[in-house]
Image (tube, helix red, strand yellow):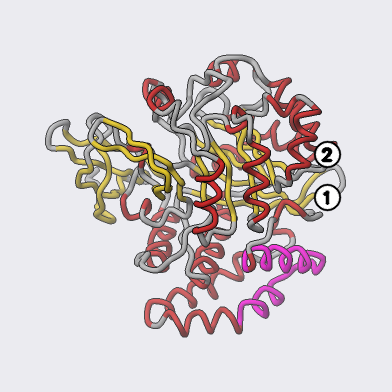
Amino acid sequence: MDSAILRRTSGLCPACRREVTADVRQNGNEICLTKHCPEHGSVSDPLAQGDDYKDLEDYYFSLMGSNSGKKSGRAILQVTFKCNMACRVCFLGDFKKHLIDFEPTLQEIEDAVKESDCRSYTISGAEATCREDLFEIIRILKRRKKIVGLITNGVKLADPDYAKQLKESGVDEVTVQFSGFDSKAEKLLRGSDSISVKLQALENLKELRIPAYINMLVAKGINEEQMVPVLSRVIKDGFIKMVNFSGILFLGEAEGFPRKHYIMPDDMLRVIEEQTGGKIQRKNAYLLKKIELAVSSFMNKKSCLYSFVSLIVKSGDGYEAIDRFLDLEGIEPHLDRYRAIYLCNPFLARMYLALMGLPIMIFHVKRFLILKELFLTATSHLFGGNLLSRASRFIYLIFSVECDPHRMDRAIHDNCPQRFMLFFEQVGEQFVRRSRPIESTTWLLWK
């Protein structure tokens, strides 16, 4: 069957990392990103299955096609390239060796934050807790009234005293990297079985009431069957409000991983729908994505097509799907109307959403107890609040991947809502230290 080209763009050749012409094409039910390298030929990587993904792409580029003036979201503050684990899927790879001494000083961090208009920061590294002055970095950010998150492997947080110091420093939220409860999969992905350590870290965070969420790395054929056990643990625990199911990145240490482990959000949504017997539905995540895109365009913010959210509502010892509370399919025609107006006049579209958004939501509410949750969620998005710091019956399930040489699509990448703050730059094959940070979303993609 001949493939139909849906959109032309540019991407990366996975072999040489040069930016080359590319296109998104449909072959039967499968939609792929195909890159064309003059040296290494054409290579295709799957994005999704089904016409609904093609329709969502159209909706996305109607609202995000021009990223001029759109704002980025949270900044990722890269504070160290040291690590206390040896993960087999570390996307930093050899960068850690070259940049091990490229740590910004406290003064450089303070100057960078002082000059930035960003309200939310995620402190990252290789492993940020390897910085002995991490608590002071957090205090610097808090003195500037910033929302501060930390992403960590959880090793040091398994120590209650360390977790207590973290709490006292003022951190707002903590992401713990996780791979599920299968020791074999954990060793294959992380290089060692650290499940008990991570669970202890989460228990300490719960004890100290530090808002936390899980970033579960997913690799097809290795641990995708662990998605529902992790979700079940989160529901039973009642503390964690967000789980990010994140597809493996074929960068750094993972470049040599077999391609059969490649997974996209559409794949993960299909897996969890099957594993939950249709309770969590892929179509709801697609409809919620349209709502998120409408809100992002209204607020003039960037958004990524490779990230989907599904909402579930905690109910007793279990959960209910969001469509039990909200008629998502009834809202969809209003989203399409917003898109049609936006294409003609973005200002009038924003007026339409401002005036009609709340009445539309109220009209399509099935159970009114959800209104409070929707209001708190909306205000958190509008005013930059921390979703995880308040009591809520919502549990956010995110299905996402980041760009790597196989899935980097320039048109989507340019709308990336996150930005790295780097205190170095690459000049040829050399790395040069900088006292002022460079903001970048692309540095890991090129050799």
Determine crowd level at label 2: few under 14, some 14-19, many 20+ residues with C-alpha closer than 10 A: some
For mark 1, what is the residue?
A: 315
Determine which quarter of the picture holds residue 235. top right
Residue at the image position 43 percent from the left and 53 percent from the top:
416
Query: Could you say where residue 83 lies in the image, as x and y percent from the top left?
Result: 55, 24
Helix or strand or loop: what does disc 1 sit on?
strand
Whether residue 352 sits left or right of residue 320 in the image: it is left
Q: Residue at x 42, y 44 (%)?
A: 435
**79 or 345: nearer the eye?**
79
Residue lying furthest front in this view? 107
Query: Which range of residues does the magenta coloring cover?
Result: 356-382
Residue 401 in picture, x, y percent from top left: 47, 41
Compared with residue 319, is residue 6 higher up or lower down, i.e. above or below?
below
- Compared to residue 207, the image places residue 338 above or below, namely below
Task: Label 2: state its secondary structure.
Answer: helix
Residue 212 visible to the viewer: yes
Q: Residue furthest right?
A: 316
Q: Nearer the viewer, residue 411 or 128?
A: 128
- Tell me which amino acid carries mark 2: Leu
Left or right: 20 with respect to 238? left
Tell which of 122 and 306 is nearer to you: 122
N-term mark: 2 or 1: 2
Q: Is residue 100 left or right of residue 27?
A: right
Quadrant occupied by the N terminus = top left
- Whether tag 2 and tag 1 are in contact, CB under 8 A, the answer is no
- State the residue lying farthest toward the left: 38
- Tell whether position 121 is magenta: no
Quadrant housing residue 124? top right
Query: Looking at the picture, how far across and down is residue 41, in whole percent?
Result: 16, 34
- In the rendered image, residue 429, in percent from the top left (x then y), is placed at 25, 30
Query: Which residue does the numbered mark 2 point to in the structure image?
Result: 208
